[in-house]
């Protein structure tokens, strides 16, 4: 398994570019199943999770080409309705094919996703939404088996804000007969970009950017071309890297409006920010100030930046509290950060972070995607050498992260197994 060897305490400066958003591309790839013919996606980074989704679409009978930032998906030929265990167990977002398969083929069998390193992650809200639209659902032999003679518009109330359930329900409702009203829908930019794609395909979804969505079912959708939005979590990871440095760094190709709460927290930590249309320059503070963080659905602070922000707080002058209300168990990385001599104590789902003046390089192990990114940031500012094993997690969601960070002065070497 590949490892990262990181020489810490380097001077960072210059600019670093953000790629297309993994979590916006995954649902849009599934949405291509709804429109027979060839859709084209641009600004698509080279990520393992996107390759896994491409593999799944091929298993269903689609033709997928994926090269140099462009992906084309021809779904005219889809003929299978099963998402097998071997793929769903690699990537939970495989559940995104449930809604489109039901809408297009009237039946789907999707392996039931298990737990993962960030918690139990149920899919009950996805299933309730499909049932509301008229599907019958059976859980059998580890598979979700869903079928419907026809889907019919309905009222869907989400008990909890869920990105995945909102998107899955949208993808089923766009071809249902009649009107669907959704309440407490998720408002993440990845939901909005899926709505943009579906509406471009001919769907009729109103209410984008709010928690109430109205979908007028249509008979057919047609293939389209679309450029993917920048990855706000990759951008946020780079902004936090910059805040940990000693000189200004500019993060380019991002959308600052998707990062408002992080920018507010960085300012509170003492950073100076120069915000342009698609770029943000961070001038790091001399002393990092402690700031409390509570993760919440968008526009709240994203759980996907919780670990990275905790690294920043581990070097603050004082004590801060970081609480994850979305995935309360998403703190496995804390023990690894403490190996680098951070001083973090867990009290249930709250990290009590007592800032230290310096982290100290050591061998650590990554256990999920964002935790890996957090350990990379910690290694970059630690004294001495940090070795991170199991970095395959990071390749799921960051395209050439070591190359990009080395471009602003980091010294990260990938040691291939
Ligand atoms: C998406 O996961 C992202 N994944 C996650 O990013 C992200 O952490 C998460 O949203 C929250 O922002 C993708 O977009 C592929 P949810 P998702 O449904 O859709 C509960 C990363 O690192 N819930 O919004 O699975 C759930 O347990 C990944 O890139 C139910 O109770 O998250 C959580 O507490 C990790 N029942 C909350 O809702 C359900 O049926 C929000 O989860 C579904 C969710």
Image: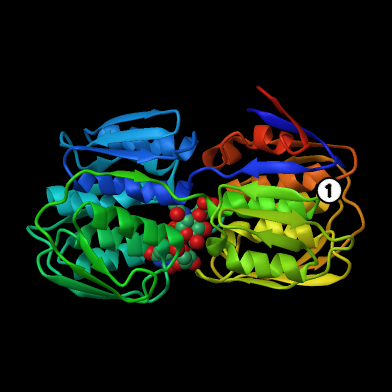
**Along the line of sight, the residue nearer the viewer: 165 or 33:** 33
Q: Is residue 393 left or right of residue 266?
A: left
Q: Quadrant of the C terminus?
A: top right
Q: Position of residue 91 (x, y in %)?
A: 44, 44
The residue at which mark 1 appears reads as 340
- Farthest residue in the top direction? 417
Judged from the image, the secondary structure of the residue bearing numbered disc 1 is: loop
Based on the displayed image, in which of its 4 quarters is residue 148 positioned?
Answer: bottom left
322 over 85 or under it: above or below: below
Whether residue 120 is visible, yes or no, is no
- Farthest residue in the right direction? 357
Q: Position of residue 193 (x, y in %)?
A: 38, 56
Q: Residue at x 12, y 60 (%)?
A: 218
Q: Quadrant of the N terminus?
A: top right
Q: Residue at x 19, y 45 (%)?
A: 35
Q: Residue at x 81, y 54 (%)?
A: 338
Q: Position of residue 178 (x, y in %)?
A: 11, 69
Q: Position of residue 410 (x, y in %)?
A: 77, 37
Q: Is residue 394 left or right of residue 170?
A: right
Whether residue 174 is visible, yes or no, is yes
Q: Is mark 1 within 8 Å of ligand 1?
A: no
| Colour scheme shown | rainbow
**Along the line of sight, the residue nearer the viewer: 58 or 114:** 58
**Along the line of sight, the residue nearer the viewer: 106 or 44:** 44
Q: Residues within 10 Å of mark 1 (few under 14, many from 20)?
A: many
* Number of marks in picture: 1
Based on the displayed image, in which of its 4 quarters is residue 188 positioned?
Answer: bottom left
307 over 156 or under it: above or below: above
């Amino acid at each position: 398994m590949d490892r990262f060897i990181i020489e810490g305490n380097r001077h960072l400066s210059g600019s670093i570019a953000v790629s297309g958003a993994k979590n916006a591309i995954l649902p849009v790839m599934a949405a291509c199943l709804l429109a027979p013919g060839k859709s084209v996606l641009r600004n698509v980074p080279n990520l393992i999770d996107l390759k896994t989704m491409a593999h799944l679409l091929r298993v269903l009978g689609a033709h997928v080409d994926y090269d140099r930032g462009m992906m084309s998906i021809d779904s005219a030929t889809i003929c299978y309705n099963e998402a097998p265990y071997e793929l769903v167990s690699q990537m939970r977002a495989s559940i995104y094919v449930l809604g489109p398969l039901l809408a297009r083929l009237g039946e789907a069998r999707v392996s039931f996703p298990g737990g993962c390193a960030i918690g139990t992650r149920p899919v009950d809200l996805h299933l309730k939404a499909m049932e509301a639209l008229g599907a019958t659902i059976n859980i059998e032999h580890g598979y979700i088996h869903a079928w419907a003679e026809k889907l019919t518009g309905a009222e869907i109330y989400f008990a909890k804000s869920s990105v995945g359930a909102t998107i899955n329900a949208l993808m089923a409702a766009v071809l249902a007969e009649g009107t669907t009203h959704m309440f407490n829908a998720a408002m993440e930019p990845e939901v909005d970009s899926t709505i943009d794609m579906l509406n471009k395909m001919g769907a009729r979804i109103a209410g984008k950017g709010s928690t109430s969505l109205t979908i007028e079912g249509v008979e057919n959708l047609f293939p389209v071309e679309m450029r993917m939005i920048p990855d706000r979590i990759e951008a946020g990871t780079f902004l936090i890297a910059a805040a940990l440095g000693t000189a200004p760094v500019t993060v380019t190709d991002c959308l600052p409006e998707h990062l408002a709460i992080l920018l507010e927290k960085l300012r509170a930590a003492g950073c100076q920010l120069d915000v342009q249309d698609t770029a943000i320059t961070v001038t790091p503070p001399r002393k990092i100030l402690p700031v409390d963080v509570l993760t919440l659905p968008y526009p709240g602070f994203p759980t996907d930046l919780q670990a990275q922000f905790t690294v920043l707080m581990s070097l603050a002058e004082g004590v801060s509290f970081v609480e994850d209300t979305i995935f309360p168990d998403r703190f496995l990385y804390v023990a690894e950060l403490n190996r680098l001599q951070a001083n973090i104590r867990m009290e249930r789902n709250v990290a009590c972070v007592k800032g230290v003046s310096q982290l100290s390089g050591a061998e650590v192990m990554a256990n999920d995607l964002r935790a890996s990114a957090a350990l990379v940031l910690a290694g970059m500012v630690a004294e001495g050498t940090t070795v991170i094993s199991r970095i395959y997690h990071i390749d799921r969601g960051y395209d050439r992260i070591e190359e990009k960070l080395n471009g602003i002065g980091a010294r990260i070497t990938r040691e291939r197994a």
